[in-house]
């Protein structure tokens, strides 16, 4: 509804920190009601700033502000710096305010960085990225199950145990989720999946 691009983006940019401030306010009220804070943090209202950042990125993309034939190596520095900042600030109260903007910088680097775009555009990375929702849905269940089996491989050396668990679980989780993705998610990525499904049902009925 806002035709002017800069006004539209400014409006979104103003609303993004407002959402983060709501979370901070909810956190300050945690002593009053932990239940209300939980509901806020896991609701759409408590996370809408991330959706707005996605809308802002979509706005840039649709108006061809991200695609560029000339990629800059300076953006390749932005990508690891933004990720490092997320790790360093993970327990800081400012993370809720800064995280949406760190995500924005990571996404911009994905389009504008020479090495970053090449890495993220690799078929292995894009394939696993396409399965991200399936992995998200099943990884906790699989970890809680696998750890009971892989726990016997413990060496009592923290970094080595973490490495062993990471490698084993990553291979198994990605492998299983690839099958689940092909069976339960990918078929529904086609817009005409209801018509295709109905056609198959009718074909089976005739057979």
Image (spheres, rainbow, N blue to C red):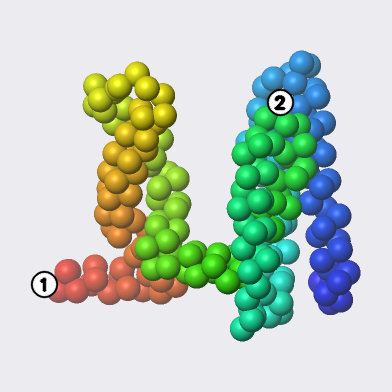
Point out residue 125 in the picture as x, y percentages from the top left corner. Answer: 42, 61
Q: Going by the image, does 123 lie left or right of 52?
A: left
Kindly state the secondary structure of the residue where label 2 is placed.
helix
Determine which quarter of the picture holds residue 52: bottom right
Q: State the residue in front, 79 or 91.
A: 79
* The label number, if any, that marks residue 36 in the structure image: 2
**Can you identify the residue that label 1 sits on?**
207
Determine which quarter of the picture holds residue 195: bottom left
- Residue visible at 67% across and 22% down? 35
- Graded by Cα atoms within 10 Å as few (under 14), some (14 to 19) or many (20 or more), the crowding at tag 1 reads few
- Graded by Cα atoms within 10 Å as few (under 14), some (14 to 19) or many (20 or more), the crowding at tag 2 reads few
Kindly state the secondary structure of the residue where label 1 is placed.
loop
Determine which quarter of the picture holds residue 36: top right
Q: Quadrant of the N terminus?
A: bottom right
- Residue visible at 24% across and 21% down? 152
Instruction: Please tell me whether residue 124 is drawn above or below residue 31 in the rendered image.
Output: below
Point out residue 157 in the picture as x, y percentages from the top left corner. Answer: 37, 22
Q: Going by the image, does 103 lie left or right of 122?
A: right
* The label number, if any, that marks residue 108 in the structure image: none
Cα–Cα gap, marks 1 and 2: 56 Å
Q: Is residue 147 visible?
A: yes
Q: In this rendering, which labeled residue sits more in front, label 1 or label 2?
A: 2
Q: State the residue in front, 44 or 58.
A: 58
Q: Is residue 48 visible?
A: no
Point out residue 54 in the picture as x, y percentages from the top left corner. Answer: 67, 60
- Residue visible at 83% across and 68% down? 8
Q: Earlier in the sequence, mark 1 or mark 2?
A: 2
- Residue visible at 63% across and 69% down? 73
Instruction: Please tell me whether residue 48 is drawn above or below residue 89 in the rendered image.
Output: below
């Amino acid at each position: 509804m806002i035709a002017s691009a800069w006004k539209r983006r400014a409006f979104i940019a103003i609303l993004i920190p407002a959402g983060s401030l709501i979370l901070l306010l909810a956190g300050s009220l945690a002593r009053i009601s932990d239940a209300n804070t939980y509901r806020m943090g896991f609701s759409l209202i408590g996370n809408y700033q991330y959706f707005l950042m996605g809308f802002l990125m979509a706005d840039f993309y649709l108006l061809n502000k991200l695609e560029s034939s000339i990629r800059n190596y300076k953006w390749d520095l932005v990508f690891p710096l933004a990720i490092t900042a997320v790790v360093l600030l993970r327990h800081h109260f400012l993370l809720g305010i800064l995280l949406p903007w760190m995500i924005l910088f990571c996404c911009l680097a994905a389009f504008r960085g020479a090495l970053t775009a090449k890495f993220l555009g690799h078929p292995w990375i894009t394939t696993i990225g396409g399965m991200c929702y399936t992995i998200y849905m099943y990884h906790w269940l699989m970890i809680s199950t696998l750890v009971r089996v892989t726990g016997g491989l413990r060496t009592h050396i923290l970094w080595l145990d973490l490495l062993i668990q990471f490698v084993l679980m990553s291979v198994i989780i990605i492998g299983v989720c690839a099958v689940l993705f092909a069976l339960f998610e990918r078929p529904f990525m086609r817009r005409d999946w209801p018509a295709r499904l109905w056609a198959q049902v009718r074909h089976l009925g005739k057979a």
